[in-house]
Image (cartoon, rainbow, N blue to C red):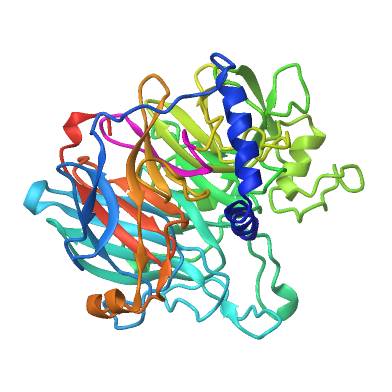
Amino acid sequence: MASRISRRRFLAGSASFVGVIAALQAHRAGAAGRYSNIVEGPYGPLLASNDLTTGLPLILLPEGFQYRTYSWDGDPMTNAAPTPGLHDGMGVVSTRGKGDELEVTIIRNHERGKGAPILAPSRYDTEGRGDNGIVPSGGTTTLRFRGREFVGVEPSLGGTIYNCAGGVTPWGTWLSCEETVIDLSAQGGRRHGYVFEVRPDAVETTAKPLVALGRMKHEAIAIDPVSKTAYLTEDNPGTSCFYRFIPVDASGVAGSYEAGGRLQAPRVAGRPNVDLRRPSLGDTYRLEWIDIEHPDADPGDTPSTRNRSGDNGSGPYLQARAAGGVRLSKCEGICQRDGKFYVVDSEAGVDAFGRVGNGFGAIWEIDPATDTLRAVFVAGRQLVADNIDNICVSPRGGLLLCEDGHPVVDRYGPGTRMIGITAKGESFAFAKNVVSLDAAQIAKAGKKVAPHDYRPEEWAGCCFDANGEVLFANLQLPGITFAIWGPWERGNL
């Protein structure tokens, strides 16, 4: 998070740097076939749209779409406690009914570090304290949506740190991922860097870490509905990878991953230590898989890698590299569609100075049937996509991505976007963040957030209900959850 913020501020204050980027992008545009393009979306141009709850003009959407917000940072939850902030990854774990009878259960992450704890029925680390004596404050909340209204929100997991993204299981639970490897055991707490399974009913959540899925800066997870094998991503800039987890218990029920399994990392067949941080559209590799013998190892402290690697990587990553594993820039979102998996590398490419792994992002397709990896989307310039992060697939088969980059300046002005991907691998803007609030607007809406221009802030947590009627998404700051609906049939989302 700190690196993203500093990079954004640097760009905002450097006109000359913007000029360099423009020149580089013009050069890249001449490289036929190397990068993806941006097109006019099937839903048409974006228009100003007011929130049905507050009346505020928060986002731009295509004609015919509407939205409602709920559970802003600081709003009272159903139990009267304030809603925790830093809304991040999110998933729909249950959908019943249709239209006005639609009932949806959503579990939402909060990417918080240490502070006021989320007082959920189950908490992992209640004693770990930082230098200032405050406790882990990350975790999850569970939202209920009925018809076209949100009807409640409650805490569902506490005592964790930097819950970034995760993934919905085929058996209807949410896997929440910690994006940290902090160890608070010396302060009376516990080690962090794990995945936790959250049940739809918060009182059934165990807060037990799924240690076999590795200790790392986790980002997201997607699961094969047939084999129950999980594919997961690691968000550690410069020393990042994706993995697969083959469970011992493939019964596909809540708690089945607690039985453990094998964690593996990819290696290009016949070519050790391939660097994939600068992909071109269509790049294809055949993969083989490396067993990670010590998934719970500390960073830089595994028998196979100690004193042998200069990488500042996690224990699983260093073991993979020592065995010839691949290297990516910054793996973030992942989703599954028709048996294939789509991994986002948010900083794949190069910047204006030619630095590898500091670009605008790419999507890799993993085909488990053939063990192949293919670059299906590569953004060579900011307008096409900028630091794409969370990703989801709609029931109509289209891919949707959340931006976590700079406020893209297009014909609609500055602001981060949610972008769709066409069948040809081109991007289009579906929604744009135009949240800029003054004190009077906030007071009239009855909210507790600070007055600020939030247009640079990231989208996160995009997910559809099972029927494809409603899209849910978050703006991490100021901390808002959106429900969006409209004429989806006009396009592939």
* Residue under the image location 60 percent in, 83 percent down: 134
From the top left corner, tell me how far across and down residue 194 is, in percent.
59, 57
Q: Nearer the viewer, residue 221 or 206?
A: 221
Whether residue 123 is situated above or below residue 374 in the rendered picture: below
From the top left corner, tell me how far across and down residue 472 is, in percent.
29, 52
- The span picked out in magenta is 383-401
Q: As drawn, which residue projects farthest toward the bottom?
A: 133
**Relative to 153, 112 lies left or right:** right
Whether residue 405 is situated above or below residue 20 in the rendered picture: below
**Relative to 72, 16 lies left or right:** right
Q: As drawn, which residue projects farthest toward the right?
A: 307
Whether residue 302 is situated above or below residue 373 in the rendered picture: below
* Residue under the image location 35 percent in, 56 percent down: 434
**Relative to 244, 70 lies left or right:** left
Q: As drawn, which residue projects farthest toward the top?
A: 32
Magenta highlight on residue 77? no
**Relative to 8, 436 lies left or right:** left
From the top left corner, tell me how far across and down residue 425 is, in percent.
42, 23
Residue 168 in view of the camera: no
From the top left corner, tell me how far across and down residue 486 is, in percent.
16, 43
In which quadrant of the rendered image does the C terminus lie? top left
Residue 312 in view of the camera: yes
* Residue under the image location 42 percent in, 51 percent down: 415
Q: As drawn, which residue projects farthest toward the left?
A: 100
Q: Nearer the viewer, residue 69 or 39?
A: 39
In which quadrant of the rendered image does the N terminus lie? bottom right
* Residue under the image location 75 percent in, 16 percent down: 270
Whether residue 254 is situated above or below residue 399 in the rendered picture: below
Magenta highlight on residue 397? yes
Q: Quadrant of residue 399?
A: top left
